[in-house]
Amino acid sequence: MQQHESLKEHYKFTKEEALLLQGLQPKMSALADSFIDEFYDYIWGFGATAKFLKNQKIIDYHRIKIKAWFINLFCGKYDLPYFTYLYKIGEVHVRIGLPTHYVNSAFTFVRTFVIKNIEKNSTDELERLKEIEAVEKIIDINLDTLTSSYREEELSKFLSLSKFEKTILGGLKKFNSYINFFLAGSLALVAFFAIGLFVYDIYLLFFSDIGIEKGILTVLGSLLVLWAAIELIHEEINHLQGKGFAIGAFIMLAMAALIRKVLIYSLSSEKGNDLLVIGAVIVALAFSYWLVNAKNKAAITAGRTDIA
């Protein structure tokens, strides 16, 4: 499933539009029964609807679920649970073998029904246009999320995974999730101790005979450790959210660790050769970081050019 926040960004769906939809919910809730009746008249025209709605019990259950989905379309809170709910609906469609064009056609009806009633009941021209734009976006987002299940199913068929392989893959994904959460917790613990180390070094700087020069360098070293821990937590959060591997951040962390070494070794006259080696490595890492950034900027520029 696509990340819900990035999906909303791609559709330029704003918080103001979410509030507009929430404001429409009372009106649409009042129209829910009419919507269901007209919706069923519409989908029975598909011809093969009876194949999926085989008896009255299934029909009654389906009507309840469709009505709940329609009202929830205007809930105003489009967070991860909402998108998970949509994705599960899509999985059901895939499991029962519902053709995608049925879903697309049904959404055409939903769009027409909602916009028709907005135009019928709205008196403010500007407000009506804003409401219609918000409705268009949330319907497209819903359709995008629902049909993502079909795309993943097609990929699964392409890979031709056996049931055993799927079980193994599912287990590995769960194990990977547990490891990632364990890493996130461990990094938080490291950050906590890094804060303690930083505070302790500050204390030594002011209340011991460690010396100003050594004390300041020690504090800077602790600060680098804390910064590194925070950066790792940030990258782990991005990873948990499904974002890519940020190699640049890890190059920066390596540079920070080496700079801390330089700060420590600079206090000793016997570490001259080590400082030269570390300095050369830092320069190499800095060049690598520049190359990574240059590549990323070039990719962004190329993407903008393609869009234009």
Image (spheres, rainbow, N blue to C red):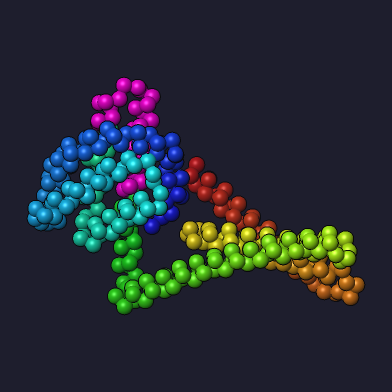
Q: Is residue 217 visible?
A: no
Image location (x, y in percent) of residue 90: 28, 55
Q: Which residue is at 12% across, 46% downward?
A: 44
Q: Outermost residue, right direction?
A: 269
Residue at 75% over, 64% down: 200
Closer to the camera in the image, 214 or 177? 214
Left/right placement of residue 292 relative to residue 33 reads: right
For image coordinates 37% across by 41% down, the residue present is 76
Quadrant housing the N terminus = bottom left
- Main secondary structure found in the magenta portion: helix
Q: For this rendering, which residue is in front, 113 or 159?
A: 113
135 within the magenta span: yes
Residue 52 rendering spot, x and y as whole percentages: 14, 56
The picture quadrant where one finds residue 91 is bottom left
Report x, y in % for residue 253. Answer: 67, 64
Total label count? Answer: 0
Q: Residue furthest front?
A: 207
Q: Residue at x 61, y 56 (%)?
A: 295
Q: Which residues are magenta?
A: 116-143
Is any atom of residue 30 visible in this view? yes
Q: Is residue 267 magenta?
A: no
Left or right? Give the position of 152 relative to 37. Answer: right
Report which quarter residue 128 is drawn in. top left
Residue 55 % position (x, y)? 9, 55
Vertical comparison of 32 with 268: above or below: above
Left or right, residue 38 beside residue 293: left
Q: Is residue 176 above or below residue 11?
A: below
